[in-house]
Image (spheres, rainbow, N blue to C red):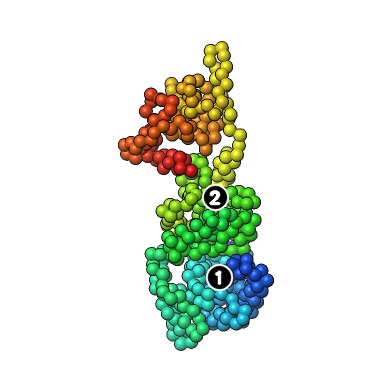
Amino acid sequence: MQEASTSQGNSQRRLAAILFADIEGFTAIMQQDEVLGRDTLAKFRRATKTKVQEWNGDLTQYYGDGCLCLYDSAVDALRCAIELQQEFRDEPKIPVRIGLHLGHIYVESDHVYGDSINIASRIESMGTPGSILLSQSVHADIKDRTEFVTRSLGSINFKNVAEPILVHGLANEGLVVPHAPMASDSYGLQILVIEDEPLAADRIIKIVKQINPNHVILDTLDTVEDSIAWLDEHRSPDVILSDIQLADGLSLRIFAGRKISCPIIFTTAFEKYAIQAFEVKGIDYLLKPIKADRLREALDRCIAATPQINDSSDQLLEEFKTLLNAKSKDFKSRFLCKLGTKIKSVPIESVRYFYSQNKITFIVTDDGSRYPTNHTLDEVDELVDPRLFFRVNRQFVIHFDAINEIQPYFKGRLKLNLLPRCDEEITVSSEKSPIFKTWLDR
């Protein structure tokens, strides 16, 4: 494998054999025995540093419990991988997965990038402890070398890769080969779970595995600080499942100032504004308790989506943070209404709904009284607590307790009967009906 490199601007494009390796279950090792965890990582780094150099490779970067290495020769990369796994089988054993791909990369002064890096990473994530997996491009380069014994695992559809890639397992003595190939339509996502309630975290993981056993839970974190540290030390997951309220603050702090290169699915119990924001922006939002069909839909969208660093991510998170803060802000406790020369103070506890008629907004209270207010309905929608009031359409903002009856209506709409009684026909559009139902069922 020899190909001259070419320069494009500040980047150098060249062909390279790319090796990814990581320690499977490293977080669990650290949780069970911190001393063992440190010793395991130290051995992993000593071995990779020594072996990669011996086989003419470049140890480009460590990612927490993993590393990225580049070689000019696929043969050297495979020989290095074999010797690494041999060393990791010696006591103390280390559960390491290794993946290789041969393709073009772009090299700049401080980092490397390219689709081939992504492919090598995906192949490595398919492995099991003690395995070495390689792409068809590596296999084609070493197929005439009798020193390497390989076994085909079939063609795999990787996310954001245009064509399926034939993956092989190295079957030399002592190496582990996954028992069965993954079906091409059962791509597994690498998922990071951020949840501070153990029962909720266990439920999420159980549902994820039921949806697709090939989905991989990279880690489960329960604080903002641990999550920040994890993202600093590891490659980006395919998707993040994150609760909003964590023990040490809002999870939004995790993403502040960080370019988000994967979808985020927020899992919490929150009001209509957050739901609307996520539906518009395309980041999903699931109410607890999590339902399997909704999580399946969300994960399917993540598989179909193209993860990319998006300049709008920070703006979205700031917008959502503002919406979250609305939950704890002081909402209006009473409305002052002018009745001729008199002023009536209407406490919010007595209000059942607001409605607009002839450009005037009226308040209807629990005893059926009606009072005009100087606020527009848009202003009212911002002033009242969204946990108690819902904007069902352009004309009505209603309190939860005002709903007497809900009836299915034409074309997926809902028809509402209110108390105190209202002569107007009140309907909820088919687009807003799911949000309204979620608000009711929170």
Q: Is residue 347 above or below residue 121?
A: above
Q: Which amino acid, by three-letter code, is at mark 2?
A: Ser
Residue 368 in percent (x, y) is at 46, 22
Which callout, 2 or 1, points at the residue further toward the start of the chain?
Answer: 1
Mark pair 2, 1: CA separation: 30 Å
Between 87 and 219, the one nearer to me in the picture: 219
- Viewer can see residue 434: yes
Tag 1 residue = 24
Location of residue 423 (image quadrant): top left
In the image, farthest residue toward the bottom: 146
Q: Position of residue 366 (x, y in %)?
A: 48, 25
Q: Residues within 10 Å of mark 1 (few under 14, many from 20)?
A: many
Q: Amino acid at mark 1?
A: Glu
**What residue lies at 53% left-to-right and 75% top-to-bottom?**
129
Q: Exactly how many numbered labels are in the figure?
A: 2
Q: Is residue 231 left or right of residue 125?
A: right
Q: Secondary structure at mark 1?
A: loop
| Residue on which disc 2 sits | 313
> Which one is nearer the viewer's eye here, 344 or 178?
344
Q: Residue at x 41, y 32 (%)?
A: 404
Residue 410 found in image quarter: top left
Crowdedness near tag 2: few (<14), some (14–19) or many (≥20) residues, C-alpha within 10 Å: many
Q: Residue 284: percent from the left, percent from the top?
A: 48, 50
- Residue at 57%, 66% in the rendered image: 112
